[in-house]
Amino acid sequence: MIRRTRELFPLAIALAMFAGLIAPATSSAADAPVAASDPTASAAALWAELNAPGDLEESVPPTTSNPATDPQPNPGSEPNPDYPGLGKESEPQSPGSPEDPNESSTPEESESPELIADPVAPTELDDLKPAPNSEPTEEEPLTPLTEEQRAQEAEKRAAQLAAQNNAITSRANLASGFKAGYIISDSNFYNGNAMSAAQIQTFLNQRVPRCTLGDTGREMGKAWGNTTLAWGCLKDAKWNTTSLTRPANAYCKAYQGTASESSASVIAKVAQACGISPKVLLVMLEKEQSLVTDTWPTIRQFNFAMGYNCPDSGPNNSANCNAGDTGFMQQVYRGAWQLKVYRANPNNYRYRPFQNNMIQWHPNLGCGTSPVYIENWATAALYIYTPYRPNQAALDAGWGEGNGCSSYGNRNFYQFYKQWFGTPNTFFPDVPQNHKFFKEIEWMGTSGLSTGIKTSDGRASMYQPKTRVSREAMAAFLYRMQGATYIGPATSPFADVKRGDPFYNEIAWMHKMGYSTGIKQASGKPKYAPKDRVSREAMAAFIYRLEGAKYSGPATSPFADMRKGDKFYNEITWMHKMGYSTGMKQPSGKPKYTPKDRVSREAMAAFIYRLNH
């Protein structure tokens, strides 16, 4: 892992950096602490909620619900969802079908925020060319590296940069949630379609609003140490990759080069070819060479962008990169290829998933090792690439320096990913591991029952646990849970849903299976009301029918607000009998079921999880 060397900035420039006036120009080593926070955009600002067409919950609006207002089912008890002193949600006036709960109309909702516009293509920089690349021949195939070929030079650089960062960077701790055995989920790591080229370009533009190459003292092509300043920043670079076209191999699909393509295009195409998330590649480019945020990079940074084939085996553990692997596209492709090799050949490497591994804290063996049970393929790949575990001092230091046995590479990977894209080691970035229903919501994602709600920039899918579930979303959840493949008829059974509408097949399937008869109208067909929110009594009825239950509720109700003879009494008491709902615990007496309350997405996850476990 090779990085450029620059003289230390004078104090005035360091203070300017701290004030946000100058973007840091020093590269962060692969294992080095780096500048504190993203000066251009926070992850929260980029997570403007959008109901993207085709997503499961496309009609779900942003929510600012307090957790106290939502049903909170768990095997023990469920808190009262009402604010003290506030009345219940008003009930619908029109009579409903005796077979299907009558939902009140969804309150008027604000319009969804618009998508961030795709960027205008950057002006092509004719002079920016990657260094000459030598392609592997049949006699010289790509060879997987061993973990011994990577390691220590970066950590030495890390300590130096951490000391600088201590004085000028925020101590805000992004490391919360870091789990040594589960740094990033496989679903986040191996999603090659996580971002399009246009989305990557927008992201790069946001990181570097203005490239300072060409400013006084930063002239393009100017000699800088043992390299030269580049002819453009990562966001502006254009690459001739015609000679780098690659056929498909055991690890990556074919890559078709072109005469001129942007860095964003290279990243997106490599991600899709090799099945490594472009988010991961962006984080690696920053972790290794600061290329994502650097406003005046050098040619050397591009030539060794991913630190691929730069074994730490030179004098004093200095990295000597193979000249045949230089060049931006070469580095991105081969780095992604290498990460896939790790998964395909786990027995060839020291760190393996699904077992305990002894991992060093630091290149200095005197710092010792610690046992880590690596829980998945992606985390094993990160340890093979950067074989040290950050200690608590490193995690507590924010972006700064820990102690003499601190390492930073995997800490920095976690923090960059979290800052830019949300928590890496959860399926949904807005559901941390300490969430009350983390297990249930994570299962909803990993099982394919929920794809989440796309953010406005398309960079992430959120679960939005406090948002209420729509009737069309409920249909989709159950349809997927049953593995259904039904295609709806040409003539819809409902007056307000037609063929071609989102989730038409799922809704028509609900009718065909007898799970929903709709809401009876004065004349004509019933309505399904797909955008209305699902009440707790409707949810009980849907699940009762799905399970084919036949149950007559007891004479004495288990809930304070339900009595024999009430609508859906059998279905609701069956939910209690089966352990799917324990109700809302009250200060005294029986719990309440609150049948008219709307179901939150986290509560729905809990109910559906219990159905399957």
Image: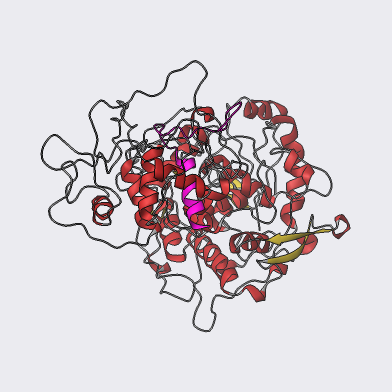
In the rendered image of this protein, does residue 500 appear above or below residue 145? above
Q: Residue furthest right?
A: 366
Q: Is residue 72 above or below residue 368?
A: above
> Which image quadrant for residue 205?
top left
The span shown in magenta is 585-613
381 horizontally vs 272: left or right: right
| Residue 363 visible in image | yes
Q: Position of residue 124 (x, y in %)?
A: 36, 47
Q: Nearer the viewer, residue 7 or 380?
A: 380
- The residue lying at 30 percent from left, 34 percent from top is 103
Point out residue 520 in the picture as x, y percentages from the top left corner. 19, 39
Q: Using the rendered image of the protein, determine whether residue 456 is visible from the camera's viewpoint.
A: no
**Is 587 part of what is drawn in magenta?**
yes
Tell me which residue sits at (51%, 52%) in the image: 610
Number of disc labels: 0
- Is residue 66 located in the magenta-colored stretch of the structure? no
